[in-house]
Image: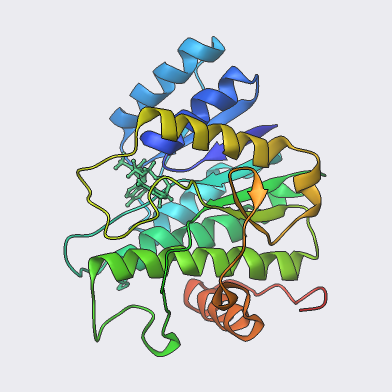
Amino acid sequence: MAVLVTGATSALGLQTALDLAAAGLEVVLHGRHAGALASAAARVAEVSGSTPRQVTADFAVLADVRALARRLEGPPLEGLVHCEETLEPERGETRDFHERTWQIGHLAPFLLTHLMLPALRAPGARVVFVAPLLPDTWIRLADLEMEEDWDAWEAYARVKLADVILAVELARRLGGGPPTVVAFDPGYARAPPPDPVVRPTRRAVRAAALDVIWLLTAGDVRYTSGRYYCDRREAEMAPIARDPALGRAIYEIGCDVLDLAPLPRAGPL
Ligand SMILES: NC(=O)c1ccc[n+]([C@@H]2O[C@H](COP(=O)([O-])OP(=O)(O)OC[C@H]3O[C@@H](n4cnc5c(N)ncnc54)[C@H](OP(=O)(O)O)[C@@H]3O)[C@@H](O)[C@H]2O)c1
């Protein structure tokens, strides 16, 4: 069984793929450009001795994400790690008419995860959303796409909050799994505003990648669906991230927009 890593062409996604390969796990690399994906695959092959499977999809195109899920139908997956991200210089919309940060960082991963759920049914299968909760982040249900008041950093932070909310809500609906669904704060850039030019050190990225592998493989994590981790410990989640009413709303609005059949809630709130 393999682990699918999204955003595997850069920083944390690539390092996670390399460390998964070094640990002897099979990895499927996702990227949006075939060239970058081939370079990443060559790096992984140096570690594993064989060229990993590669899948392309631009998350700014929802049809691409659906096609990606169709290509991955069949053999079960052991894990799905979400490392995609975008920080947009100005407000723009995708051809699906969604605000770009929202679609690339939230709607597309939401869609991919939902479509891959049947492949993630093996005992112990896991989904990891790399999604740090940033201070003072809010989300306005009436304006999820920030049409009224857009700011690059707030758009990014809102996406990360929505991803954590989604992880918690999926855990509620999957009743503990499989798959186990967790959110993860890599912990290397907590203080806003982010400077896109300043990148985390290689050492910090390596540490975060090893934490992701721990989340995918540690026995205890399997029973902690819906939790939020940092530094291999459960981290406190802002109340807004585990608000059951907000979780229901974000999930059901997402399913509606993405034309997905919502899962029923399986257990207590
Ligand atoms: N960087 C930080 O300081 C920081 C801090 C805290 C948390 N995080 C989180 O950690 C995760 C990984 O961060 P990182 O530093 O590894 O980010 P990164 O180097 O910017 O990598 C982002 C990845 O997302 C991909 N991507 C961007 N737009 C896409 C699209 N339209 N469709 C599909 N893929 C797309 C990129 O592909 P291309 O190579 O084609 O651009 C790249 O592989 C993210 O979830 C991020 O929010 C990062």
Left/right placement of residue 164 relative to residue 264 reads: left
Corner quadrant of residue 40: top left
Left/right placement of residue 232 relative to residue 180 reads: left
Q: How many marks?
A: 0
Q: Is residue 80 above or below residue 183?
A: above
Residue 74 location, x and y as percent? 68, 41
- In front of the other: 97 or 183: 183
Left/right placement of residue 27 relative to residue 173 reads: left
Report the residue that reaches farthest toward the bottom.
Answer: 142
Q: Say which residue appears at 66% left-offset and 42% top-offset.
A: 215
Q: What is the basis of the colouring in this image?
A: rainbow
Q: Is residue 109 above or below residue 247?
A: above
Q: Is residue 187 above or below residue 147?
A: above
Q: Say which residue appears at 58% left-offset and 18% top-offset.
A: 22
Residue 265 location, x and y as percent? 76, 76
Left/right placement of residue 193 relative to residue 5 reads: left
Residue 122 visible in rendering: no
- In front of the other: 75 or 18: 18
- In front of the other: 93 or 220: 220
| Quadrant in which the C terminus is drawn | bottom right
Q: Say which residue appears at 69% left-offset and 47% top-offset.
A: 126
| Quadrant in which the N terminus is drawn | top right
Corner quadrant of residue 241: bottom right
Report the residue that reaches farthest toward the left.
Answer: 90
Residue 105 location, x and y as percent? 40, 59
Corner quadrant of residue 244: bottom right
